[in-house]
Amino acid sequence: MAETCRCKPQRKNYAVHVSATMAERARYMEKLSTDKYIQLTKKRNAVEGIPSVLRRRFRIDDIPTFGYLRSRQFVLLKIGTYNFNKLLRHNRRIGGQSAQNLAIA
């Protein structure tokens, strides 16, 4: 135990020095390990992934138009394309199991 602990031997006992930043970091790491925080980080990753995909795959940074209205339409069309592709992938994944497909058949 003494090998893993960062304690210093003194005359009659051992001393452990803990700084304020070490204690604050320990509290922060304890907070990070809760289930609620883990769920929030998963949502954050999903939200931050959308702009990354729009930049990499749909090249939203290279707008070939000028003007506010045309640029806005360009961005909205790219976002619509992204949503449509996600819908297509979702429909392929679930196949004919959705309620709407059952109502049509």
Image: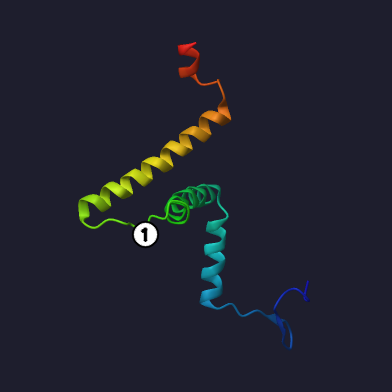
Q: Name the residue: 43% across, 43% down.
A: 82
Nearer the observer, 90 or 69: 69
Q: Position of residue 40 (x, y in %)?
A: 48, 49
Residue 54 is left or right of residue 38, and the answer is left
Q: Name the residue: 54% across, 50% down.
A: 38
* Above or below, comparing residue 78 to residue 62 in the picture: above
Quadrant into which the N terminus falls: bottom right
Q: Position of residue 92 (x, y in %)?
A: 55, 30
Which element carries disc 1, helix, strand or loop?
loop
Q: Name the residue: 40% across, 41% down.
A: 81
Q: Quadrant of residue 9?
A: bottom right
Residue 96 is left or right of residue 58, and the answer is right
* Above or below, comparing residue 20 to residue 33 in the picture: below
Q: How many marks?
A: 1
* Above or below, comparing residue 36 to residue 83 in the picture: below
Q: Position of residue 74 (x, y in %)?
A: 31, 49
Callout 1 crowding tier (Cα within 10 Å): few <14, some 14–19, many ≥20: few
Could you tell me the amino acid type at mark 1? Asp
Nearer the observer, 26 or 77: 77
Q: Residue furthest front?
A: 64
Nearer the observer, 5 or 15: 5
Q: Position of residue 35 (x, y in %)?
A: 55, 47
Rendered image coloring scheme: rainbow
Q: Which residue is mark 1?
A: 62
Nearer the observer, 43 or 78: 78
